Amino acid sequence: MLSTLSLEVADKLLKDGKEEDAKAYREMGADQLRILLSMRGETPAMQIKYSDITIANGKYEEAMTTLYEVKANVEKGSMLYFEASKRISEVYARQGKWREAADYPEFLSITAGFNSRLVKEKWPDMEAFLNKCYDNGAQRPKIGAKKEEPKKEEQKPDEKKPDAEQKTEEKKPDAEKKTDDAAKEPAAEEKKTDAAAPK
């Protein structure tokens, strides 16, 4: 494929320090891919390859549009989804948007782990990439941090008490009333006795 050949030449020129020539060959490769995409239809694999060229040429917005389109059209757990997400993170890093660059590798580190087969084979320097994001201002997530429970406030005298406490207190006046009535009864009987007594 001509686009692949032009990219290989661009890589060699770049290694030789000929950035402008390398960029011209990458553009040639991008043109060839655009023609293929229009003829065959936009397959996610070809779109990713196209985004690689646009990233290398510094056309980040165009690359991001293509990569987000890939993510929207492939299954979330697929290799194409991974490849598009990885490249999105790398573009954000190139733009200095470190918080956004860290999002996907953080997610991947939690769900798959740094030692997972996927990460070891397809993104072996992901941990170093993530640390670079943190070194440049992305905030590390606080995983496993305990949430503080709100302190129970002491009950103020004028606040309503729970129903169980209210019922207990409602019964108390009746009990006190009975005690008061019992204390009054002997006094009433004494009056009767006094009234019945001969004078």
Image (cartoon, grey):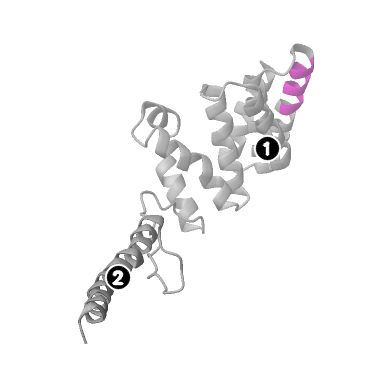
Q: Is residue 153 above or below residue 138?
A: below
* Nearer to the camera, 3 or 189: 189
- What residue is shown at x 45% (from left), y 36% (from top)? 108
Query: Seen in the image, is 34 located left or right of residue 45?
Result: right
Q: Residue 64 falls in which quadrant of the image?
A: top right
- What residue is shown at x 74% (from left), y 21% (from top)? 32
Q: Is residue 122 magenta?
A: no
Query: Seen in the image, is 86 located left or right of residue 178?
Result: right
Query: Seen in the image, is 45 located left or right of residue 168?
Result: right
Magenta residues span 30-38
Report which residue position mark 1 lands on: 64
- What residue is shown at x 41% (from left), y 39% (from top)? 109
Q: Residue 53 falls in which quadrant of the image?
A: top right
Q: Mark 2 touching mark 1, by CB under 8 A?
A: no
Q: Is residue 172 above or below residue 68?
A: below
Circle 2 or circle 1, nearest the eye: 2
User: From this viewpoint, which residue is outermost toward the front?
Assistant: 199
User: From this viewpoint, which residue is outermost toward the top?
Assistant: 40
Q: Amino acid at mark 2?
A: Asp
In which quadrant is the N terminus drawn? top right
In which quadrant is the C terminus drawn? bottom left
Report which residue position mark 2 lands on: 181
- The location of residue 198, given as percent across then percent down, is 20, 83
- The location of residue 134, given as percent across then percent down, is 46, 54
Q: Is residue 32 magenta?
A: yes
Measured in 3D between alpha carbons, the distance from the residue under mark 2 to the one under mark 1, in whole angstroms, is: 88 Å
Q: Residue 124 falls in which quadrant of the image?
A: top left
Q: Residues within 10 Å of mark 1 (few under 14, many from 20)?
A: many
Q: Is residue 145 above or below residue 115?
A: below
- What residue is shown at x 52% (from left), y 23% (from top)? 79
Decide if residue 177 is in sight here: yes
